[in-house]
Image: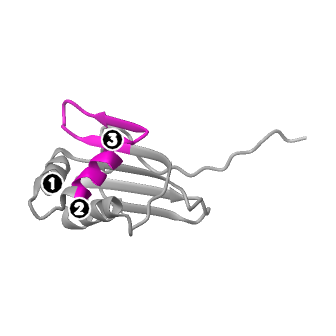
Amino acid sequence: MGYYSDTALTLTKKGVEALSNKLTDRETPEETRGEVQDLLSQADSHYTNSSSGAMVWHWAWNKWYSDFSEVAFVESLMHEMDDEDYLFIRIGEDYADTEIRGCFWENPFGMELNRSIAQGKVR
């Protein structure tokens, strides 16, 4: 069991380069490197925008816990980057559990958080 979230990360080309540099840094433990690469490869969707070099990963229904080394790695990366170089959105199981970090709103993937009111048939 556990608590599950829908999670998405979009990086500008500069953000992708920061990710690559952090993954190849000698100070990053080999085990963490492998866990991060597994996390990225297990995304439910992953796209690269060929004209801008931006990338997006989306994980549906995953466990996003800060005490997981791969999650801590991504959170540390976001903390080190300029807000304009990433957009991170996490929607937890609880209705009010929504997290947005970064300011890469004009991303080529149209990634954003939407909220709406839906009405069924009125009888």
Q: Residue at x 66, y 50 (%)?
A: 117
Return the residue nearer the eye: 107 or 32: 32
Which is nearer the N-term, disc 1 or disc 2? 1
Q: Residue at x 74, y 45 (%)?
A: 119
Disc 1 residue type? Ala
Residue density around tag 2, few if under 14, some if 14–19, many if 20 or more, within 10 Å? some
Q: Secondary structure at mark 3?
A: helix
Q: Check whether the beta carbons of the residues at disc 3 and disc 2 lie within 8 A of each other.
A: no
The magenta stretch is: 31-57
Which numbered disc, 3 or 1, marks the residue closer to the eye?
3
Mark 2 — residue?
Answer: 77
Q: Secondary structure at mark 2?
A: helix
* Image coordinates for residue 77, horizontal then vertical, percent: 23, 61
Q: Check whether the beta carbons of the residues at disc 1 and disc 2 lie within 8 A of each other.
A: yes
Answer with left or right where residue 93 lies relative to residue 110.
right
Tell me the distance, in whole angstroms, between the alpha carbons under discs 1 and 2: 8 Å
Which is nearer the N-term, disc 3 or disc 1? 1
Tell me the distance, in whole angstroms, between the alpha carbons under discs 3 and 2: 17 Å
Which numbered disc, 3 or 2, marks the residue closer to the eye?
3
* Image coordinates for residue 96, horizontal then vertical, percent: 58, 66
Mark 3 — residue?
Answer: 41
Disc 3 residue type? Ser
Q: What is the number of the mark on residue 18?
A: 1
Q: Residue at x 47, y 51 (%)?
A: 113
Residue extending farthest to the left is: 26
Which is nearer the N-term, disc 3 or disc 2? 3
